[in-house]
Amino acid sequence: MDHYTARKRNEYMEQEEDWDRDLLLDPAWEKQQRKTFTAWCNSHLRKAGTQIENIEEDFRNGLKLMLLLEVISGERLPRPDKGKMRFHKIANVNKALDFIASKGVKLVSIGAEEIVDGNLKMTLGMIWTIILRFAIQDISVEETSAKEGLLLWCQRKTAPYRNVNVQNFHTSWKDGLALCALIHRHRPDLIDYAKLRKDDPIGNLNTAFEVAEKYLDIPKMLDAEDIVNTPKPDEKAIMTYVSCFYHAFAGAEQAETAANRICKVLAVNQENEKLMEEYEKLASELLEWIRRTVPWLENRVGEPSMSAMQRKLEDFRDYRRLHKPPRVQEKCQLEINFNTLQTKLRLSHRPAFMPSEGKLVSDIANAWRGLEQAEKGYEDWLLSEIRRLQRLQHLAEKFQQKASLHEAWTRGKEEMLSQRDYETASLQEVRALLRRHEAFESDLAAHQDRVEHIAALAQELNELDYHEAASVNSRCQAICDQWDNLGTLTQKRRDALERMEKLLETIDQLQLEFARRAAPFNNWLDGAVEDLQDVWLVHSVEETQVRKLVPSRDQMLQEELTRQQVNERLRRQFAAQANAIGPWIQGKVEEVGRLAAGMAGSLEEQMAGLRQQEQNIINYKSNIDRLEGDHQLLQESLVFDNKHTVYSMEHIRVGWEQLLTSIARTINEVENQVLTRDAKGLSQEQLNEFRASFNHFDRVSRGLALWGGGLGGWLGGGDQGQSLTSAPQLQKRNGMMEPDDFRACLISMGYDLGEVEFARIMTMVDPNAAGVVTFQAFIDFMTRETAETDTAEQVVASFKILAGDKNYITAEELRRELPAEQAEYCIRRMAPYKGAGAPAGALDYVAFSSALYGESDL
């Protein structure tokens, strides 16, 4: 019995033995106690061939009192005094009282003289003290003893029965159903409980009394009428009578103890299996999500338009902000569940959990790294594609603008060059037409560069895989074809004008003579020609158009200036927040790392501090959300550079995810330490010693941040475009001993390690071959012999009791002895018994017990 139980027992005994001399006993209670205590004493005295008739008279000389104590204790008391004088009687009673006191019972207010004088109240108090010490005190159920243990035993036994709710040792027994339920639970053949009625308390009580006396050798200690007619039956009388049932079913208690052990073992196994199933389910779902997501991230088929690519970017932003964060939490929870499960398995001496193929923590970590690599490549490609489309859009607009200007300039030129106006023109007109044609040829030559620029733009659009390259090529070809045709027509017109000029010059010579004779007419004709020439030299329309383009260009430049000013404001707004958030996250990561490395105080204090840190981190999430909003505005404005900060949104996201993961893992480590401490009874001083030893040989620099050690490591050496997805591969492990460090630690503690022995130990502390030893595994190894735990042999022995010493057990026996859930669990998992002489449906509990502990045989 532990110190706590002994203390509680003594407190209870002192309370029960503190009899008040002046307090009058309730007449109804006195009657019940007199009858019950007399019957209880006689149930033991008859073993010595005697009995008492009157409880206050028959114990006065102390002889039967001493005999009663010898019978119930199995020990010899001092020889009684044979005299009949008062002092002889007092001496004998004192010998009895001294024996009671020697059993650790403090008698209060009970003296030998009062017993010798026949004081009924004191005599009943003394007998109750004896009953309490020898019939009730040693009752123990699930770490409770005496009265509480007996009450718990009654509650557990009667729990399945209708109309029974045992809460005390008085009113809960008035209708007799609780007593009948106790009998039926252990001997269902004696009472047909289904036929009992709650409204027949006297019938129920008498049935219980008669059956108990006839078949269980429990004398009738109470009267049904007294119990029913008393508002609150005497508690001591009821407890005395009920304790007789407890001892009568002592054999059944052995089976109950065995069933309790099995239930405890099965509960541990069921909880572990539930964690295994949850791990497998969560791992499958996470791996399936990764399997579905990676092809999407690896798809590098671009969209033809900027708007379509921006939708892709929006989808990716939703993925990073909405879809991935829950998966990050799932991955972290998966690792936490795995570590907790392995801790519980080690504490219960079960074999380490080995996930199904492809679902190891390392498999998930590898898949996650593949996801993040694909994610980084996808984001780089998205931004590259958007920049390409941005340039394409600019080139396309430029092509369209220049093509339109050129087409507007060429409009009507072919018709003009195809005119035959020179056929009816005079020599001066032809010469004027030639001058105009020469001016046109100069203009045409100047436009050659524009056509070549248009062709170059079309070529670049083709090289950049512009989605409307076909229409661009068609338009460019039309322009080139038209240009060639203009050149041909220009040359033809020049030739025709020159021929016409020569012809008219000949005619002019012929007409010279005529002209001299027709001077007035020639003067008029010359004036007309001059008038005609003045009309052809006017170019006011083109000049007007140029003047209009200047203010239009000014407006475009002003709009672009405004847009760039807005973009700059967005850059500075994002940078101001990022430059505050980035260092805050890094500082928190380092702070959590320091907490994990140098935890002080009790585990509960550590947990409280970590929970507070976790809440502070969660409360900071609104700042990340605001930064995401500013980042979205930048992307929508097609701004992808920011000279005002070294922190990109991707850096902040990865840092935030690592911070959440870090605090969750650290909290889980403390939770597992609590499990280990409670299971193995470790003190805080022992845990501190373990931590100091572990830290001494864990040579990893505790100052390294989880983001790769400072800003340089975090940002990949200053490259603002580098993601942090590779950071875990670059950093040293934190809070984990390498095998060489662990070996040095063991040697320093006096272990004589050869290669084979050290390899065996490593399989214990690193069952999944991760190549490191965690602090939790270190504690488990150092305390591996200290925990009290069930073994396969103990479980087999417990099943053997339930099976009635048979080598097999039946489903009926399991359902009778175990709670329904545990019974069905065993029935589903036990293999058929293959030995001879077993009935159909017999189950092999030996193989089942071995499997619980990962053993092939016993």
Image: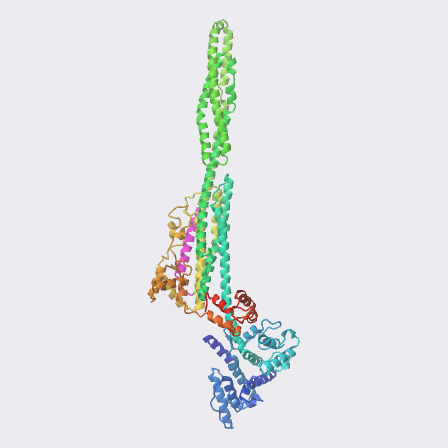
Q: Is residue 84 above or below residue 122?
A: below
Which span of residues is magenta-colored?
Answer: 575-602
Q: Residue furthest right?
A: 199
Q: Nearer the viewer, residue 342 or 126?
A: 342
**Residue at position x 49%, y 89% from top?**
94
Q: Main secondary structure of the magenta part?
A: helix
- The answer to whether residue 405 shows anywhere in this view is no
- Quarter holding residue 210: bottom right
The residue nearer to you, when weighing 97 against 770, is 770
**Residue 163 drawn at (x, y percent):** 62, 72
Residue 585: in magenta span: yes
**Residue at 49% of width from left, 60% of height from top?**
276
Between residue 740 and residue 109, name the one nearer to us: 740
Measured as percent of width and height from the top left, residue 88 is found at 49, 93
- Which residue is rendered at x = 50% and y = 62% of the image? 273
- Residue 489 visible in rendering: yes
Quadrant location of the C terminus in the rendered image? bottom left
Q: Is residue 487 magenta?
A: no
Q: Position of residue 17 (x, y in %)?
A: 52, 82
Q: Name above or below for residue 171 compared with residue 671.
A: below
Residue 62 location, x and y as percent? 52, 90
Task: Name the foreground residue: 116 vs 420.
Answer: 420
In the depicted structure, whether residue 82 falls above or below residue 292:
below
Colour convention of the picture: rainbow
> Total number of numbered labels?
0
